[in-house]
Amino acid sequence: MRVSSPKYNKGEIHYSLIPEFWNKGYATEAVQAILKHGFETLNLHRIEAGVATQNLKSIKLLEKVGMTREGIHQKFCRFADNGLTILAMLFWWKIKLSLSF
């Protein structure tokens, strides 16, 4: 999790799993633990996550852990393996300090 300056008191999460570990609950468990740590240990006010608009499984995961879609964000992404830069459309999700774990 990337944590902002104390002035903004928020975190941002990103995750990736190799396909052989998909659909086993690992990402859900990890994201729930990260959210709990962010709110309870780091005392963050807000945690955000970006997900590609076509990534339906990640969208379902973020909804499952209580995050809500806030908007669409355009972002330039560079892929390290080939240096390719693309403009990606991302849904931006947020969760505020209203969860109970």
Image: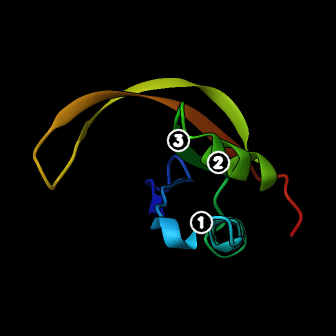
Residue 88 placement (x, y as % from top left): 36, 29
Tell me: 25 left or right of 51.
Answer: right
Tell me: 34 left or right of 60.
Answer: left
Residue receiving disc 1: 22
Q: Are marks 1 and 2 in contact (CB under 8 Å)?
A: yes
Quarter-of-image position of residue 32 = bottom right
Q: Amino acid at mark 1?
A: Trp
Mark in front: 3 vs 2: 2
Q: Amino acid at mark 2?
A: Lys
Residue receiving disc 2: 57
Tell me the SS state at disc 3.
strand
Relative vertical location of residue 46 with respect to residue 99 in this rendering, above or below:
above
- The span from disc 3 to disc 1 (Cα, nearest Å) is 16 Å
Quarter-of-image position of residue 26 = bottom right
Q: Residue at x 54, y 30 (%)?
A: 53
Decide which of 21, 62 is in the foreground and name it: 21
Residue 65 placement (x, y as % from top left): 77, 56
Badge 2 crowding class, 10 Å Cα cut-off, few under 14, some 14 to 19, many 20 or more, is few
Residue receiving disc 3: 51
Tell me the SS state at disc 1.
loop
Q: Residue at x 89, y 64 (%)?
A: 100
Which of the two labelled residues, at mark 3 and mark 2, occupies the earlier sequence position? 3
Q: Amino acid at mark 3?
A: Val
Which of the two labelled residues, at mark 3 and mark 1, occupies the earlier sequence position? 1
Tell me the SS state at disc 2.
helix
- The span from disc 3 to disc 2 (Cα, nearest Å) is 10 Å
Residue 33 placement (x, y as % from top left): 68, 74
